[in-house]
Image: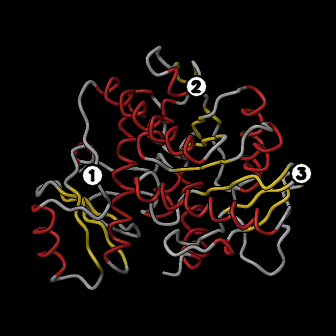
Amino acid sequence: MQQGREQEIRRTVVDLAQKFLETGLVVRTWGNFSARLDEESFVITPSGRAYEGMAPSDLVKVSAVSGKVLDEGGYKPSSEAPMHALVYRHFPAVRVVAHTHQVYASAISLLDTDIAISAEWQPLLAGSCLPLSAYGLPGSKNLHRKMETTLAQTAARAILMSRHGAFVLAETTETCVRLARDLERFAISIYEDRLGRKTRQRPDINDDSTEEENLARALQSTSDEAVSVSTDAEVKPWLSRRLRPYLDDFAQICGVSAGHRRGSANVAFDPERGMAICYGQDLSEARNVRAVLEKNARAANIAELAGTPPLPMWEAWIMRLVYKLKYSKQAGR
């Protein structure tokens, strides 16, 4: 491939990642994006690198045939690069792939089944069924094998990943963004229908209500760590209970269990004042903890209706340990 063409595609992937960041479909370094270079290779976002300020040269070139890195001396590719390689092998027409941890798509994955798409949504989601790829530990060969099974059984361009997020396949970057947005709108409609009530999502993970600002200010005066507060309506049903990980990133980022006593978690509940307290090394990290908490609460609300259990405790501990030892360092905390 000509160098100029490859640089153009690399820039396209960076722009795509930043567009998803702007729309709130991804936050921080979560998720990954790729684009096909030719029949045998693609470029993908690196592991643990923030999308803000990412340069085209930061992307990693990977073989679509073997899944091996073709760049020498660069960054490590996303741990989900093997799944992207599978897509490019299975679907020659697909040029762009996005893996997101978007809130409501992640939550409805706890229904633990394929989801029928109603007639009004079918033209937008390009199909009659939203398939579910079975759960596996993040980045594991087991997860990738399960995605391969799903890809072999469907022509869908949007796929739910159990307890994890969504996989979006497209011919263009514009279609990719549009499809991910429509998937989230559809997921919200499913969530509201199952719970029998309207829901509201924080417009941006950095937005605080006046009440949350005041509560956080009072707490910050007595804490050595940065503090963020959630009074989110979907979290409140859990404030008098223990909230376990239903999504894998809750185990990684928040802890293996959240309750009145903080323990080793980054979250503590205060039911008397109707809030969850989220901690971090800085305010940005505390708000990231809050974002994952609020997403996991939505997943837990769906899971209770569907009878889906939380993650096994041993898996939650493994993910928490791996994240603390590896991914948090890659993110440059």
- The residue at the far top in this view is 119
Residue at the image position 67 percent from the left and 48 percent from the top: 96
The residue singled out by tag 1 in the image is: 202
Q: Determine whether the residue tagged by mark 3 lies in a helix, strand or loop.
A: loop
Q: Is residue 228 left or right of residue 157?
A: left
Q: Give the vertical position of 115 relative to 188 (above or below).
A: above
Q: Earlier in the sequence, mark 2 or mark 3?
A: 3
Quadrant of res 89:
top right
The residue singled out by tag 2 in the image is: 126
Residue 315, given in percent of the width and then of the height, sits at 59, 54
Residue at the image position 27 percent from the left and 52 percent from the top: 202
- 110 and 332: which is toward the camera: 332
Mark 2: amino acid: Ala
Q: Determine whether the residue tagged by mark 2 lies in a helix, strand or loop.
A: loop
- 44 and 66: which is toward the camera: 44
Residue 91, given in percent of the width and then of the height, sits at 78, 36
Residue 203, given in percent of the width and then of the height, sits at 28, 52
Question: What separation in Å lies between label 2 and label 1 (alpha carbons)?
Answer: 28 Å
Q: Determine whether the residue tagged by mark 1 lies in a helix, strand or loop.
A: loop
Q: Earlier in the sequence, mark 3 or mark 1?
A: 3
Mark 1: amino acid: Arg
Q: Which of pointers 2 and 3 indicates the residue nearer the eye? A: 2
Q: Give the vertical position of 194 relative to 213 (above or below).
A: above
Question: What separation in Å lies between label 2 and label 3 (alpha carbons)?
Answer: 27 Å
Task: State the mark number for residue 65.
Answer: 3
